[in-house]
Amino acid sequence: MNFSKSFRNTFLVILLSLIVSACATKTTSTKVEGQMQGDVYTGTDTVKYLADGVPDRVFFATNESILTTKSRDTLRKQANWLRANSSINVVVEGHADERGTREYNLALGERRANAAKDYLITYGISADRISVISYGKERPVDSGSNPLSWSKNRRSVTVKAN
Amino acid sequence: MIRIFNLTLLVFLFLITKANSLIEIDITRGNLDPLPIAVSPLFQDDNSKKNSINEIKVENVGSEISSVVENNLKTSGLFNPLSKEAFLQKPDIAHLKPRFEDWALIKAQALITGKVTIENKKLKVEFRLWDILAGREMMALAFTTVPTNWRRVGHIISDKVYERLTGEKGYFDTRIIYVSEEGPKTARVKKLAIMDQDGFNTKYLTLGNELVLTPRFNPSSQMVTYLSYFKNLPRVYLLDIETGTQEVVGDFPGMTFAPRFSPDGKKIIMSFAKDGNSDIYTMDLENRIVERITNHPSIDTSPSYSPDNKFITFNSDRSGFQQIYVMKSDGSNVKRISFGKGLYGTPVWSPRGDLIAFTKLHKGKFYIGVMRTDGSGERLLTENYYQEAPSWSPNGRVLIFYRETKSNDKGEGFSAKLWSIDLTGYNERQVQTETDASDPSWSSLLSN
């Protein structure tokens, strides 16, 4: 990541929202056939489900740990599911893409996992039911070296711990 | 476990002629004109050859040792070892008294000769370094050791020659600890591995059952600190290479990572991540007292001490993006030092104290570079698709790092290899490893 790319991404997001507001019929055409918005993955290729309609993962922009609207939606579904299944504890795994130094990515993965954890907590899930682990860039789900692959790897994944 | 550092090596200093010699090498600049040197095979008599086969299954250990020397000198980029086929004088005769005009004829400026005997389970090696132009001996040394140490003898000879001709300590009798990698990108198996700096004598220190990362030597190179995911708890560990004893040192309520020894060997400095924030801590290895060094809501990681233990350089995104900072070792006086375009990571202080090596990411390319400790004089040494994590040779003249290649959509074409480059930016070369490799750390000089 660098400044210019980040500006470009921000620009893309702004541009996109302009297009969205200006022309409702063109909302689906963004980048890489609708699988990315800015550089956040929006597809479902790698997504697994904790239960029917409850996706296990959320995706992040490069170097970011901010939760997108869609991510917050996913995490609210996870929180509902956790409330309904109070005996289940989870581990939130934080991951980064391969385009960063190893140690920084470990810290970034931890930050992402905690962003997801904190959101679950604000939706009423007890902190002691959620542990976090960062894998940095060590466990990619997609082994390609391209922007789409990287976007799938910048993720936090909620997995059952028991 | 592995007894690699206990060595009984007796060094007898015969004579070092400090008289003005005509040859010397300036290693502070890129050397495009390596010194032509003749490495005559070390002479070994027939009786000794028999013992050599019996003891170490090597027939001509004399010429094997000279190959080790030749390879080291060549790899340094400062020497040009000449083809043996052109040598006119026999090894035993040359060792007694070279005919300088014969060696001058093949354009050699320096000559190494020597003699090897194996008797009573002892390897005795003597060698001499000759200045061809001045027509005199520059150095003569002899070693006695156990025969299985023959490669180390080659490294020590290389160090002596390097030191005599450049005026600086060598880096050949050293080891590299690194992470060996195998398997597909999505399920990589990683083990700690250690090898001689020339890629020989590889040994694996872990089995690959758990993920291990970022091993680093202590100053005596007998201990290693690293990150292990043992029982799925990423924590900093300490490993005694000789005994194989492992213990967790960063057993905090959260991930500890990015460990490194202080140059006095008394502390481990590392990051501790909790609740989405990574800060830098130290642990005193003697009394286990933990000290918090940074306290900032940003990511603070990759700490590295200055050689005098007084300062710490580290990586932080407190400005919004990854940059390099320097502070006093108590955490005060934090100053950002990287101001160029792009992101900066993995700062590591030179053993000479004057430079910090780093990884830089700019416009989708990764660079290994160096800057002064106040951030001035930034110099990028090499650019590639992906490379990071430089580690200094003990003399501060060479950096080793790892480089990854781009893979296609199926993950094919991916590799991770070790590379080295001179501080001058010249002499970039791949370091041979048995498997894919990453996270190299260079040991101190094991002898002298």
Image (cartoon, coloured by chain):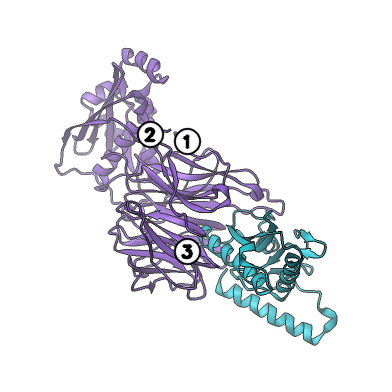
Chain colours: A cyan, B purple
Image quadrant in which you'd find residue B308: bottom left
The residue most toward the bottom is A22
Q: Considering only vertical position in the picture, is B384 above or below B181?
A: below
User: Residue at 34% of width from left, 72% of height from top?
Assistant: B332
Image quadrant in which you'd find residue A44: bottom right
Quick one: label 3 or label 2, which is nearer the N terminus?
2
Residue carrying label 1: B203
Quick one: label 1 or label 2, which is nearer the N terminus?
2
Q: Considering only vertical position in the picture, is A72 above or below A109?
A: below
Which of the pair A82/B46 is nearer the observer?
A82
User: Residue at 62% of width from left, 71% of height from top?
Assistant: A118
* Nearer to us: label 3 or label 1: 1
Left or right: residue A49 versus residue B55 is right
The span from disc 3 to disc 2 (Cα, nearest Å) is 33 Å
Residue type, numbered disc 1 = Lys
Residue type, numbered disc 2 = Ile
Q: Say which chain tag 2 marks.
A: B
The span from disc 3 to disc 1 (Cα, nearest Å) is 30 Å
Residue B4 bears which disc, if any?
2
Residue type, numbered disc 3 = Gly
Indicate the quadrant containing the C terminus of chain B: top left, top right, bottom left or bottom right: top left
* Nearer to us: label 3 or label 2: 2
Residue B86 appears in the figure: no
